[in-house]
């Protein structure tokens, strides 16, 4: 028994030292000589994992269940050894996005969802309260054990008055500590170096204290491990206590290992220490082996202390107090006092960090979003919110500790330490699916996370919390024994008749089954908002992109002044000024207040705010000043549509420009042809004047002869007059044909289009030219199909063509009676083809196109004058093409020329093949 005042003085001194160290840590940080830039300090701060539960409870657990307590160390060891897979990613994301708590982390992953951050905060609070209560209880109990004459009696005594309750004073001291060192900065993502230093110090103290007791027991009371275990065997201590084995099967071992694997990551205080407080990611490398080593060292003496306690203390002594009572039983009061300080450090370390972590969540993820949403508070219009923020955070610290203390007073005497701790672990383990799933699976949705977490939480409450409450006497054991409403398969510890598992594994099984099931199921069938998709990518691909390169799916706009005011409100004028100057410098821009802020400045503002009020609230705040907000899916689609319109437009432009090029080329070609036409026109005029002049000249000269020579003989005179008449006729024909051609080419001319009987037209043309054939003693053969064949044409014009072709043919056939012209008509696709062939000299292939030009007359092989005008064929081509047919020349089988004419049966069945412009020539 130690005098109360001694314990009090020692405790107060210890707490005083703690304050001093924290103050020193903060000072060093301010001086730029940070203590936490050290992997050893980082690792020790993570050792806040070992709470009084470990310190006292592990021994208690070992005394009852043997080496099972090792699982609590095995889990974190595994997580840290495998740091490269999960921890590294979590730490990177936390740092890159200035995440302030696990609630912030999960909410940020799922689209900065306020709903989710509230839910996580609630679960974390519910899960942490018993844990804080547990620490207070451990301190109070250890005090009573030390001070009381009889440890067992002291433990069973009713709780003292609040004023006389050590736990109360500890809670109070921790509140002061939390306020002093936990809320020095407004930016929660800035590091609490003083706190970290103090916690690292506490880790050293608790380790040393525990080792001291362990060494004393093993080597002071006995001659080392061998002797200790030998004596244990002989004094009838159950062998399970100190031999590795699983008396209850592997179920509980697996569950506890899994739970503690998750706890080291998901417990709010562990997240705070491992992820939020990291100053250097590389410290993880050291921690990955040093932290497991710490756990190994602190666990070495657990079994020896437990076994010795079982041997030297009376049966029924509380094993949770062995660390104190074994030294006391040996009269080692100093050692016991040291152990008490170790337990105190384990408890206070946990309480401090948990309180800071929770208060950050409560203020950032619960209170701030709520306040910001209440419009009549007009918070967003208030000038400086830094004071309010600090107040909220401090109030949250007090509230958390008050709740923890209240919980302890309420549950008081009941429950072994280990059981309470595991309840907390299981609550934290509910974060694991959403957290770890969200790290690797982009498809995980907010709704999935919310439903998984909610269901898991409910299952935790029903299968874990409820039975423990019932066992503490706060609820009737009715439900636990008989199930909800007396329905047996609703019994909390054997849901649906699942009785094969121990209660812890049972609770883990159901809560995770529901949690993971809902998380995966809802995610698979749900849809993500654009914001969620962005955040999912940011999280999953964190190693693929640089910190600042958040995808710019934003289309928000705000002025520089708006953002400045926002930062000033939450972080103070100095910070606002500093960050904006830094931004200007870094980006080489100036930021006049009225200027439109770019996306990067907006993102920076949001990140900065996130560090102080959490991601979800930061988003709300920035949204409140930024016009346009987040783009909805519709908007994204619209943007995409606009983009594709722009693409289409530019494609059209491109097309237009190629069209333009084409047109230019065509114009150039047309111009070339116009020039050519102009030349042809000149040529034509000179040709025509020449053609007209020839007959005119002969008319004129013969007329002059007639006038000038009165004594011309009558015979001579009549011969000259005959020439004059023929020449005038030729002139008339020439002019008629020229006019006709001009009319045809100009597209004037009256056309009486309609079905024309082809056979009839050919027979009529033969009849018209019959005289010519008689004159030249030539024969005309018609080979026509038997029935009448209508073609689409103007009858008179068609006759004109046939007559022209027949009179040409007859002109060239031999005069000796062997002359022969043959007309035949055959179907030609959808048209009819008429061929008129003769046995004359034919037309040389080079001339076959030419003869369709005006005035072209091929000299006859016999040198005889061609007669005619050279206009018949051009006119014929005009006519045939007007009908939609074609005319061309081939070799006749009979040796002469063969003119082929196609004629469509209906309108435009055979389109003209030659472009009209060239036709003008
Ligand atoms: P023309 O009034 O001189 O007959 P055309 O245009 O009808 O004018 O004929 C042009 C030229 O085509 C003729 O001068 C002649 O050289 C040639 N030609 C037309 N038909 C035949 C044919 N059946 N055999 C040989 N040459 C022909």
Image (spheres, helix red, strand yellow):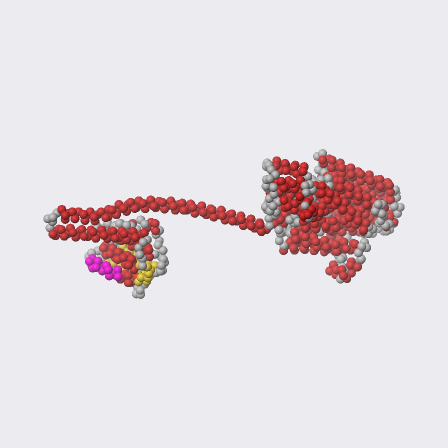
* Position of residue 785 in the picture relative to residue 144 (left or right): left
Q: Is residue 596 above or below residue 813?
A: above
Q: Is residue 390 above or below residue 778?
A: above
* Position of residue 838 in the picture relative to residue 166 (left or right): left
Q: Residue furthest right?
A: 149
Q: Which residues are magenta?
A: 764-782
Taking the spot 77% from the left edge, 55% from the top edge, the residue there is 466
Q: How many marks?
A: 0
Q: Residue furthest bottom?
A: 787
Taking the spot 75% from the left edge, 60% from the top edge, the residue there is 490
Taking the spot 76% from the left edge, 46% from the top edge, the residue there is 399
* Position of residue 141 in the picture relative to residue 78 (left or right): right
Residue 778 lies in magenta, yes or no?
yes
Identify the image quadrant of residue 881.
bottom left
Q: Nearer the viewer, residue 394 or 408?
A: 394
Q: How far across and down, in percent of the image, does residue 626 sit? A: 62, 45
Q: Nearer the viewer, residue 768 or 566?
A: 566
Dominant secondary structure, magenta: helix
Q: Residue furthest front?
A: 376
Taking the spot 24% from the left edge, 49% from the top edge, the residue there is 859
Is residue 886 something that shows in the picture?
no
Residue 95 lies in magenta, yes or no?
no
Is residue 918 something that shows in the picture?
yes
Q: How far across and down, in percent of the image, does residue 477 sit? A: 80, 58
Q: How far across and down, in percent of the image, does residue 393 sit? A: 73, 44
Q: How far across and down, in percent of the image, does residue 414 sit? A: 82, 52
Q: Nearer the viewer, residue 610 or 424?
A: 610
Q: In which quadrant of the rendered image does the N terminus lie?
A: top right
């Amino acid at each position: 028994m130690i005098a109360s005042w001694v314990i009090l003085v020692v405790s107060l001194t210890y707490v005083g030292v703690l304050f001093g160290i924290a103050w020193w840590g903060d000072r060093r940080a301010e001086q730029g000589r940070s203590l936490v830039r050290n992997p050893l300090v980082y690792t020790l701060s993570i050792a806040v994992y070992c709470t009084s539960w470990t310190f006292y409870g592990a021994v208690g657990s070992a005394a009852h269940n043997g080496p099972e307590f090792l699982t609590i160390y095995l889990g974190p060891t595994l997580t840290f050894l495998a740091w490269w897979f999960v921890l590294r990613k979590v730490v990177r994301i936390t740092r890159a996005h200035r995440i302030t708590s696990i609630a912030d982390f999960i909410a940020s992953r799922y689209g900065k969802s306020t709903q989710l951050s509230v839910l996580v905060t609630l679960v974390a609070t519910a899960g942490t309260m018993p844990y804080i209560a547990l620490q207070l209880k451990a301190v109070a109990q250890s005090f009573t054990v030390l001070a009381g004459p009889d440890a067992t009696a002291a433990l069973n005594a009713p709780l003292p008055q609040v004023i006389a309750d050590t736990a109360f004073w500890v809670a109070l001291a921790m509140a002061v500590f939390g306020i002093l060192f936990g809320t020095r900065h407004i930016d929660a993502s800035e590091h609490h170096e003083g706190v970290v230093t103090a916690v690292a110090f506490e880790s050293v103290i608790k380790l040393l204290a525990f080792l001291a007791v362990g060494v004393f027991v093993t080597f002071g009371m006995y001659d080392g491990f061998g002797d200790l275990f030998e004596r244990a065997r002989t004094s009838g201590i159950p062998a399970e206590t100190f031999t590795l084995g699983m008396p209850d099967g592997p179920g509980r071992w697996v569950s506890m290992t899994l739970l503690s694997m998750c706890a080291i990551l998901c417990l709010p205080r562990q997240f705070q220490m491992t992820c939020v407080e990291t100053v250097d990611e590389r410290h993880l490398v050291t921690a990955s082996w040093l932290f497991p080593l710490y756990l190994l060292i602190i666990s070495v003496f657990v079994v020896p202390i437990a076994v010795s306690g079982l041997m030297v203390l009376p049966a029924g002594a509380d094993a949770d107090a062995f660390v104190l009572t074994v030294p006391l039983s040996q009269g080692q009061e100093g050692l016991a006092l040291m152990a008490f300080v170790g337990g105190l450090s384990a408890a206070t370390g946990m309480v401090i960090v948990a309180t800071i972590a929770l208060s950050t969540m409560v203020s950032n993820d619960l209170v701030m979003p709520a306040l910001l949403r209440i419009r009549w508070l007009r918070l967003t219009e208030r000038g400086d919110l830094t004071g309010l923020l600090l107040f909220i955070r401090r109030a949250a610290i007090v509230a958390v500790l008050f709740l923890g203390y209240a919980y302890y007073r309420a549950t008081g005497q009941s429950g072994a330490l280990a059981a309470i701790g595991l309840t907390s672990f299981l609550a934290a383990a509910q974060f694991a699916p959403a957290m770890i799933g969200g790290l690797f699976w982009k498809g995980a949705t907010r709704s999935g996370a919310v439903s998984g977490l909610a269901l898991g939480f409910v299952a935790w409450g029903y299968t874990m919390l409820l039975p423990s409450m019932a066992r503490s006497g706060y609820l009737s054991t009715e439900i636990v024994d008989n199930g909800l409403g007396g329905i047996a398969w609703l019994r909390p510890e054997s849901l649906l008749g699942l009785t094969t598992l121990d209660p812890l594994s049972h609770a883990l099984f159901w809560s995770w089954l529901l949690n993971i099931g809902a998380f995966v199921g809802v995610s698979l069938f749900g849809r993500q908002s654009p914001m969620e998709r962005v955040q999912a990518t940011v999280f999953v691909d964190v190693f693929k992109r640089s910190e600042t390169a958040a995808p710019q799916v934003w289309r928000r706009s705000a002025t520089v002044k708006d953002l400045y005011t926002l930062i000033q409100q939450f972080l103070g004028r100095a910070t606002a000024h500093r960050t904006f100057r830094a931004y200007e410098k870094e980006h080489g821009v100036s930021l006049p207040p009225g200027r439109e802020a770019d996306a990067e400045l907006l993102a920076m503002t949001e990140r900065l705010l996130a560090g102080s009020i959490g991601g979800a609230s930061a988003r709300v705040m920035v949204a409140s000043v930024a016009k346009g907000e987040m783009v909805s899916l519709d908007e994204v689609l619209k943007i995409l549509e606009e983009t594709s319109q722009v693409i289409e437009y530019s494609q059209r432009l491109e097309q237009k420009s190629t069209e333009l090029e084409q047109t230019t080329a065509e114009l150039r070609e047309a111009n070339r042809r116009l020039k050519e036409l102009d030349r042809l026109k000149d040529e034509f005029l000179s040709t025509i004047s020449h053609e007209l002049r020839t007959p005119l000249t002969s008319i004129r000269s013969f007329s002059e002869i007639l006038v000038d020579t009165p004594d011309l003989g009558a015979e001579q005179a009549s011969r000259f007059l005959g020439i004059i008449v023929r020449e005038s006729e030729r002139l008339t024909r020439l002019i008629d044909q020229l006019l006709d051609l001009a009319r045809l080419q100009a597209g004037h001319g009256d056309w009486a289009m309609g079905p024309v009987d082809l056979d009839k037209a050919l027979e009529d043309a033969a009849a018209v030219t019959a005289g010519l054939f008689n004159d030249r003693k030539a024969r005309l053969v018609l080979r026509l199909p038997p029935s009448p064949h209508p073609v689409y044409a103007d009858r008179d014009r068609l006759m004109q063509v046939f007559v022209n072709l027949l009179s040409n043919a007859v002109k060239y056939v031999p005069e000796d009676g062997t002359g022969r012209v043959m007309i035949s008509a055959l179907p030609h696709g959808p048209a009819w083809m008429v061929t008129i062939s003769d046995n004359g000299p034919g037309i040389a292939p080079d001339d076959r196109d030419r003869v369709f030009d005006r005035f072209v007359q091929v000299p006859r092989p016999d040198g005889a004058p061609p007669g005619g005008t050279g206009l018949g064929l051009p006119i014929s081509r005009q006519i045939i093409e007007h009908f939609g047919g074609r005319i061309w020349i081939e070799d006749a089988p009979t040796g002469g020329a063969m003119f082929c004419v196609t004629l469509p049966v209906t309108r435009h069945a055979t389109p003209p093949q030659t472009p009209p412009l060239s036709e003008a020539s």
